[in-house]
Amino acid sequence: MQLVPVAFSDLPGWAEDDLQTFTGAFERTCARMLRAPPEKPLGPLPEAGTYADWRPACEKFLGLKDKTAATLRAFLEGSFSPYAVWLGEGNTGLFTGYYEAALKGSKTRGEPYTIPLHKRPADLVMVDLGKFREELKGIRIAGRVTDGNLIPYETREQIVTGNWPHNDKVLLWVNDPVDAFYVEIQGSGIVTLPDGSEMRIGYAGQNGHPYTAIGKELIARGALTKDNVSMQEIREWLAGHPDQAAEIMNVNKSYVFFTEITGEGPLGGENVPLTPERSLAIDRSIFPYGLPFWLEAQHPLDQTKTIRRLMIGQDTGG
């Protein structure tokens, strides 16, 4: 990957973006940055600098009284220098979207609410390897300690089949195993309880095993083709094959734990509330949280339209 200096005028659609909806997202990131140790690097990208480097821009931004689109554009052009991310041959990236899932559930177990969403277990240890070696910045692992050694945590299959020692640590019970699976992928959701009230849940930890896309497994088994694999097709296949659904979902060894979220939400990996259409999930082994990104991508629902807007890295895949 190379970073190539460009001008703001080189960003397609830069002058047309209504930056006012970006304001809240950047305010949350700046508030977090101003609380961070000044000498600490933002992350693995050297060009991102330290939190001290960002302090003047964040203080100026938070102090702006007139946050019109024109004022925000002038602030950004005066405070930042854009760089194009050059990926080499092809120079294209994969753009995907995600959402806050909606589920039905209960705080107590009972038909039809029999599928658990677990709280983070006390023995889960999540390790930021970048704190141990500079070259490992952005890499995280998780496990549990046994006899003084950190060993891999239980897989999804080991957790959901009932042999896990923390099966009693349940945040909520939901009525659909496929919904439970997909809220893990999204990392957050809103659960409607039997009395009609709603409870927002968010990411509290992950078992450390890598995420595996089950769509690839369904293609490998001939259940779906590359042309028709999509979240909706996968969900329909799982619902139509309940005798095989658990086996397929267990191919993804990753398992996510949840906590109740109060106030604004959902929370992203940066631990700030996400902003629709402005918060971006990033690869933290390359980019740190808090960087603004100019996005140009085809609209997923209408290939004749192009999305062009300023976004900010506030989340990561799980």
Image (spheres, rainbow, N blue to C red):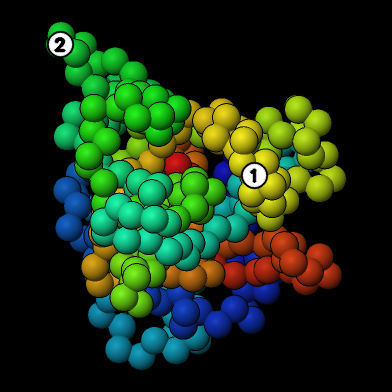
Up-down relation of residue 132 to residue 105 (above or below): above
Is the N terminus in the top left, top right, bottom left or bottom right quadrant?
top right
- Residue type at the position of mark 1: Leu
Residue found at the very far front of the displayed protein: 111
What percent of the width, then of the height, locates residue 109?
30, 52
Image check: 257 left or right of 234?
left
Under tag 1, what secondary structure? helix
Please identify the quarter of the rendering in which residue 75 is found.
bottom left
**Could you tell me if the residues under marks 1 and 2 are in contact, i.e. CB atoms within 8 Å?**
no
What residue does disc 2 label? 148
Front in this rendered view, residue 93 or 48? 93
Under tag 2, what secondary structure? loop
Up-down relation of residue 44 to residue 288 (above or below): above
Please identify the quarter of the rendering in which residue 27 is found.
bottom left
From this viewpoint, is residue 66 visible?
A: yes
Up-down relation of residue 50 to residue 262 (above or below): above
Q: Which of marks 1 and 2 is in front?
A: 1
What percent of the width, then of the height, locates residue 147?
15, 9
Front in this rendered view, residue 58 or 258? 258
Residue found at the very far top of the displayed protein: 147
What residue does disc 1 label? 238
The number of discs equals 2
Identity of the residue drawn at 76% across and 27% down: 221
From this viewpoint, is residue 26 visible?
A: no
3D distance between C-alphas at marks 1 and 2: 40 Å
